[in-house]
Image (cartoon, helix red, strand yellow):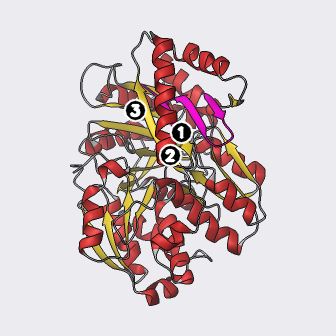
């Protein structure tokens, strides 16, 4: 069973049986539920929805099913076709739309796809709204339009270019400074839409670009999650080309990782740290990331005179806390940059532009910038779940086992030890328990993760 329904959307593997996998019927049913929810809750007489997709193989099929379902509900659609998650997010308010749908399974392998849902601000839905849509889908409470009231589809194919122009308008992005620096950059876009967006942005910034896996054909040449173990090719190419850095994005371009000039990972967690360091050096304020993110952001924020806060995992939770605490930048430690001056969504284009501007201003190498930050190491592991495993019971047992430490249950169980921490939580997008640990050395982070895995397996047994 590979169909996951959550408040943020529906995600599953293509093919198989209805209700077990992401079949055409499931896609239509969920698109109809979202469209019906919009019609029920919007004050607009005529609803408009922006739809865009990443380049995965099933994308065109899911796109057509979604578009025509919305049309059948009497909803007008702005079809961006090949796009990115942040591009759809900025397009929703620019088009005065009532919502948006992004057809992407993010970092999941090619057999997966998903419908991710946005509100009229181009932001992910609240838990309450998502739950209402799931209920509509379950009850199949759809009323389709009469023939004279069908919606229309308007196709706009240049929204990535418009997105780039919005990024270049940001006050803290200095294209002239980046151009003068004369950077040479290798890009790995895992053959998805980042292969369109990132090279275009870099060229607008006056950067020499070397493209690796930038053809948006959906045939991912490696696991699309931008982790060290998947990025051997770009690490080697950065060294071979004597490039200044490498840029890696996931299929929908909301996660961002850098490679330094020596072919070493800058560290997915430190993408946000570096961008925040730059923004805080120009704008006093606070920061937010989720509970699974590095302590390094807290350290950098406090050094700059700001306050750091941690939210539950999930972009909507980060955004909510950012608004409450007036954060000037935030995001997730998986390489997701949320910069409110642009919009409240993870945006790799914004991250690239901020990072390169900072690098050009400081006139140092990527490795030197990384060495300037507090040294933390993370270990990211997971345990596959079966239907028989009671995750809540496992988390409760772990909480009780480590009750003498500082324990948070805002999202799963996070245990803060004096020198390190572990965060245990059930994934919202995959049938797994995620186990994140952080310590002052990689060895200690790995050891802590192994200890937690042993503890959990004993509880399961």
Q: Which residue is mark 3?
A: 11
Establish if 408 lies above or below 233: above
* Residue indicated by mark 1: 437
Residues in magenta?
411-437
Picture coordinates of residue 421, whole percent (x, y): 61, 38
- Spatial CA span between label 3 and label 2: 27 Å
Earlier residue among tags 3 and 2: 3
* x and y, in percent, of residue 303 in the image: 73, 64
- Rendered image: mark on residue 378: 2
Q: Residue at x 64, y 18 (%)?
A: 401
**Which of the marked residues, 2 or 1, is nearer the chain's N terminus?**
2
Judged from the image, the secondary structure of the residue bearing numbered disc 2 is strand
Residue 243 position, x and y percent, is: 32, 76
Q: Is residue 251 visible?
A: no
- Position above or below: 258 against 335: below
Residue pictured at 45% horizontal, 90% vertical: 180
Whether pointer 3 and pointer 2 mark residues with C-beta atoms closer than 8 Å, the reply is: no
């Amino acid at each position: 069973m590979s169909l996951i329904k959550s408040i943020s959307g529906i995600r599953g593997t293509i093919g198989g049986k209805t209700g077990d996998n992401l079949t055409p019927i499931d896609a239509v049913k969920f698109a109809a539920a979202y469209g019906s929810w919009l019609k029920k809750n919007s004050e607009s007489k005529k609803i408009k929805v922006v739809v865009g997709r990443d380049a995965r193989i099933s994308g065109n099929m899911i796109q057509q099913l979604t578009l025509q379902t919305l049309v059948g509900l009497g909803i007008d659609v702005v079809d961006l076709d090949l796009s990115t998650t942040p591009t759809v997010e900025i397009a929703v308010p620019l088009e005065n739309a009532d919502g948006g749908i992004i057809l992407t399974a993010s970092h999941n392998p090619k057999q997966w796809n998903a419908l991710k849902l946005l509100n009229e601000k181009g932001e992910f839905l609240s838990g309450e709204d998502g739950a209402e849509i799931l209920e509509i889908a379950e009850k199949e409470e759809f009323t389709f339009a009469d023939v004279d009231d069908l919606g229309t589809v308007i196709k706009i194919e240049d929204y990535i270019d418009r997105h780039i122009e919005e990024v270049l308008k940001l006050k803290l992005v200095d294209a002239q400074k980046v151009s003068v620096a004369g950077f040479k950059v290798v890009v790995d876009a895992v053959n998805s839409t980042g292969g369109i967006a990132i090279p275009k942005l870099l060229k607008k910034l006056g950067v020499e670009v070397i493209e690796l896996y930038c053809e948006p054909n959906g045939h991912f040449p490696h696991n699309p999650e931008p982790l060290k173990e998947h990025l051997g090719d770009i690490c080697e190419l950065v060294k071979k080309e004597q490039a200044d850095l490498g840029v890696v994005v996931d299929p929908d371009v909301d996660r961002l990782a850098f490679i330094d000039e020596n072919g070493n990972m800058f560290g997915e967690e430190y993408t946000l740290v570096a961008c925040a360091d730059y923004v805080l050096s120009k704008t006093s304020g606070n920061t937010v990331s989720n509970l699974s993110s590095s302590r390094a952001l807290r350290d950098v924020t406090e050094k700059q005179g700001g306050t750091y806060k941690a939210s539950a995992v999930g972009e909507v939770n980060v955004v909510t806390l950012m608004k409450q605490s007036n954060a000037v930048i935030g995001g997730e430690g998986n390489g997701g940059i949320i910069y409110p001056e642009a919009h409240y969504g993870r945006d790799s284009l914004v991250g690239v532009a901020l990072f390169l501007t900072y690098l050009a201003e400081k006139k140092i190498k990527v490795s030197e910038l990384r060495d300037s930050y507090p040294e933390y190491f993370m270990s990211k592991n997971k345990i596959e779940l079966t239907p028989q495993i009671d995750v809540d019971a496992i988390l409760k047992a772990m909480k009780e086992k480590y009750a003498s430490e500082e324990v948070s249950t805002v999202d799963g169980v996070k245990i803060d030890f004096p020198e390190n921490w572990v965060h245990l939580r059930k994934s919202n997008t995959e049938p797994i328990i995620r186990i994140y640990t952080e310590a002052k050395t990689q060895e200690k982070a790995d050891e802590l993760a192994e200890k937690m895995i042993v503890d959990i397996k004993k509880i399961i047994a």
